[in-house]
Amino acid sequence: MYEHRSQPLLPVRHFIRRLAGHSLAAVAIVSFSLAAGTLGYHFWARLAWIDAFLNASMLLGGMGPVGELTTTGGKIFAAVFALYSGLMLIGVTTLILAPILHRILHRVHLEDAEVNESAEG
């Protein structure tokens, strides 16, 4: 997926395309998670659509639930969705940062290789 350490640094145009692809994947994951959370809160917690959307959004954003849940199914769903949301936040952050960190490390490796070559020669 990424260039090997012996390959040259990816041109900026291709890097931006890679970053856009990762960002698009992150948006898709967040959108799917928001839809699943809204549906879960609506059907299992018996919340109105807007309240279900609010709860799902707040959990996915790391803020926590809003309001009190009264159904057992809703409480179980909220617990599972809260765990999922925390892990999903870490995953999406990693997905977005991966190309940036790879580019930085690749550039440092190339610079180190150039220094080593000039010291040997």
Image: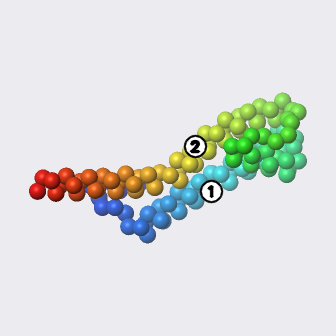
Location of residue 40 in the rendering, given as x and y in whole percent from the top left corner: 78, 42
Task: Give the camera-side residue of 111 and 33.
Answer: 111
For label 2, the crowd category at 10 Å Cα-Cα, with few meaning under 14, some 14 to 19 and many 20 or more, is: few
Q: Are marks 1 and 2 in contact (CB under 8 Å)?
A: no
Task: Give the camera-side residue of 83 and 118.
Answer: 118
Res 44 seen here: yes
Q: Amino acid at mark 1?
A: Val
**Residue placed under numbered mark 2 in the picture:** 90
The residue positioned 65% from the left and 51% from the top of the image is: 30
The residue positioned 37% from the left and 51% from the top of the image is: 105
Q: Secondary structure at mark 1?
A: helix
Location of residue 18 in the rendering, given as x and y in whole percent from the top left corner: 47, 61
For label 1, the crowd category at 10 Å Cα-Cα, with few meaning under 14, some 14 to 19 and many 20 or more, is: some
Q: CA distance from mark 1 to mark 2?
A: 14 Å
Res 41 seen here: no
**Residue placed under numbered mark 1 in the picture:** 27
Q: Amino acid at mark 2?
A: Ile
